[in-house]
């Protein structure tokens, strides 16, 4: 079974490749901070299925969430910081082990990234779609690594 470092690398690499390819094709354009946040979301997606275990994945997951939350606060994105804080509680509230390592969970777990901003802030889905896709890409990297290993 791949370790948390492999998941971090795979999530970041897949997200970076998808973002780079999308930018090359002219489908997507973003600032470096936005790209860094998308890659962070992908890494979080790659770590989430292992958050219920005894590995170092939960520590890495929460460390990245804390850094992301601090960056949002320092840049004045307080409402988004609240959403990140809510996501930080999910692995503690829901038993992650078992069901999280499934293909359907790859779409279900990141779904609140699309739904919650719309419910709370009336944000358009196309504003949150890149974050949803980044989380799905990270999750996919985790599942592929697990299948291959």
Image (cartoon, rainbow, N blue to C red):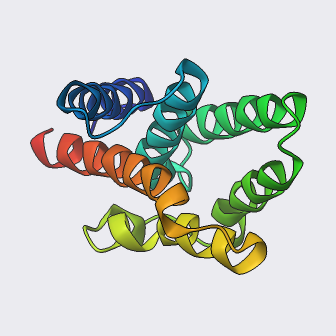
Q: Residue at x 83, y 43 (%)?
A: 77
In the image, residue 94 lies at what x, y percent? 63, 73
Quarter placement of the C terminus? top left
In the image, residue 83 lies at what x, y percent? 75, 59
In the image, residue 70 lies at what x, y percent? 83, 31
Q: Residue at x 53, y 58 (%)?
A: 128
Q: Is residue 61 above or below residue 87?
A: above
* Residue reaching furthest to the left: 148
Q: Residue at x 78, y 38 (%)?
A: 69
- Dividing the picture into quadrants, the one containing residue 112 is bottom right
- Dividing the picture into quadrants, the one containing residue 25 is top left
* Residue reaching furthest to the top: 32
In the image, residue 30 lies at what x, y percent? 48, 29
Q: Is residue 113 above or below residue 14?
A: below
Q: Is residue 109 left or right of residue 122?
A: left
Q: Is residue 28 left or right of residue 91?
A: left
Q: Is residue 112 above or below residue 137?
A: below
Q: Pick the residue in front: 139 or 34.
A: 34
* Residue reaching furthest to the front: 26
Q: Is residue 85 above or below residue 31?
A: below
Q: Pick the residue in front: 133 or 64.
A: 133
Q: Is residue 91 left or right of residue 88?
A: left
């Amino acid at each position: 079974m791949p370790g948390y470092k492999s998941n971090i690398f795979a999530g970041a690499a897949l997200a970076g490749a998808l973002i780079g390819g999308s930018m090359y094709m002219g489908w997507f354009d973003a600032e470096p901070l936005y790209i860094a946040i998308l890659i962070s979301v992908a890494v979080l997606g790659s770590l989430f299925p292992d958050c219920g275990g005894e590995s170092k994945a939960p520590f890495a997951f929460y460390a990245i969430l804390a850094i992301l939350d601090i960056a949002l606060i320092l840049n004045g994105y307080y409402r988004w910081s609240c959403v990140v804080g809510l996501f930080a509680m999910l692995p503690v509230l829901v038993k992650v082990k078992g069901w999280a390592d499934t293909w359907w969970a790859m779409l279900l777990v990141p779904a609140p990234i699309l739904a919650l901003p719309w419910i709370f802030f009336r944000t358009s889905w196309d504003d949150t779609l890149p974050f949803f896709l980044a989380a799905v890409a990270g999750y996919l990297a985790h599942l592929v690594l697990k299948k291959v290993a």
